Amino acid sequence: MKKWLTVIILLGIVGFTYFCFFTLSSDSSDKEKQVKQVELTFLRNLANPAFNQAYEEMVSAFEATHPNIKINMQSMHWGSEYELRLRTELAAGNHPDIMAIDSPNLALYANSGSLLSIDSYMKEEGNTEDIPEGVLKGLTYKDEIYLAPIVESSIALFYNMNIFRKAGIPFPSGNPNNPLTWEEVLEIAKKVNNPAKGVIGIDPAQGFNVGEGPAYFKMPILWQFGADVISPDGSTAQGYLNSPEALEALQFYQDLYSKHGVAAVEMPPAPFETDKLGMTVLGSWAISELQQTPGFVLGEDFGVAPMPKGENQVVPNGGWALGISSKTKHPEEAWEFVKFATGYEGSKLFVEISGDLPARYSVAKDFPELNEYPKNIFVQQDQNYSKNRPVTPAYPVISEAIKDLFEEVGLEGKNVEEAANKAVVKINNGLKDIKK
């Protein structure tokens, strides 16, 4: 009897050991499966090294705290190459789970059904009150939020202090709430302009380039003079882009080149850094770029002032923001990444590395340099005086029309009203095509 009892006990011990081993192995296997169960594809734009590093470290930080989510990040050069790749992938049905989108193009993707509305996510846990109203408006289509911002952008008036000193002109105020008027800028440009010595008064809006730059830098001139590009309901450009206020803005711009001769169609290489350009309008990112020029020092050789105003004080906002594909199989996990990347923690990490302007009030407050001259100019303008470009599926047509319009007015010297009417027709045709 004792012998059988011993056998039974031994079998019990063996069985219990096997059960424990199997259970632990099974649990370990299940946990391993959970860690690797979700992989999200993230397509984004390439930029400068600091920007790219910021994304790399942000993804690593997210994955460290979310072991069940793997981010497969893919990148392409920004601009037409990126837009072409993204639209080609979407048309072919190859939807990345998460995608970076230049905010002016938001409506094009939302209208086509490619983007998932994140309105409920943002309002429930995205802290929308931490984002400036003007910025949030540019991420909204048909009253639904589709994109979440990490960083923002702004522009300002940069002036060459060496040229100002020689002309005996006082430096403009660095107070974001006290900009020069465009008329005051014109008078300064006249005084510093010196064709005999090859000195140009002002580059008012980044010359004549391609891509989105022309619309970003030139559209604010229309806004500053009290004009707009299309109607509030997005149905027409008639009466807006060719309004009296728009024509006044366009004529002022043209006169800088043709009547006053203080702006030049062709400029020498690096004119601002070589003391050949008195004033220029640049983005916030230009501060660090300019200081890479040996012997060209902020506060000694160049300064920054708020963007000039006309009837209104206004600057452009917008930038690359994150959206979620409407076709993703993992919307909750995709939102977890977007929430982290665009929330306080992810945004702060991104700004620390990239040096860009944060989209959130809370992040901006945590960086002393963003609350001091000159970066405070860009931050406060973005928070208090910024406006988004039109949110419409026809925006690519609008962007191209604005580029062409300012080229015809400034570069070719065409009649302002005729050029504006031509742009109106082009935009209205684009708006009609969207409705079909």
Image: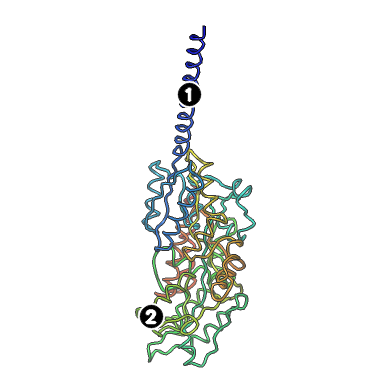
Q: What residue type is labelled 1?
A: Thr
Q: Residue at x 45, y 51 (%)?
A: 60
Query: Which residue is most to the left?
Result: 269
Question: CB of mark 1 within 8 Å of CB of mark 2?
Answer: no
* Sequence order check, earlier mark of 1 and 2: 1
Q: In this view, does 59 lie above or below 198?
A: above
Count how many numbered circles sit on residues in the image: 2
Asked whether 272 or 316 is in front, the reply is 272
Q: What element carries label 1?
A: helix
Q: How many C-alpha atoms fall within 10 Å of the one at disc 2: few (<14), some, or many (≥20)?
A: few
**Above or below: residue 20 compared with residue 269:** above
Residue at 43 percent of width and 61 percent of height: 51
Query: Where's residue 92, x and y in %?
Result: 38, 42
Q: Within 10 Å of the Cα at label 1, are there few (<14), some (14-19), or many (20+) other Cα atoms?
A: few
Label 2: state its secondary structure.
Answer: loop
Q: Position of residue 196 (x, y in %)?
A: 38, 92
What residue occupies the far top of the structure in this picture? 1
Q: Which percent across, then down, holds residue 206? A: 43, 73
Residue 141, image x and y in percent?
Answer: 56, 51
- Comparing marks 1 and 2, which lies closer to the viewer? 1
Q: Which amino acid does label 2 sit on?
A: Pro
Q: Which of the labelled discs sits on residue 105, or is there none?
A: none
Q: Name the residue under label 2.
A: 294
Q: Rounded to the nearest whole Å, what is the CA distance between mark 1 and mark 2? A: 73 Å
Q: Say which quarter of the image contains residue 129.
A: bottom right
Q: Tell which of 415 and 338 is nearer to you.
A: 338
**What scheme was used to colour the molecule?**
rainbow
Q: Nearer the viewer, residue 205 or 329?
A: 329
| Residue annotated with mark 1 | 17
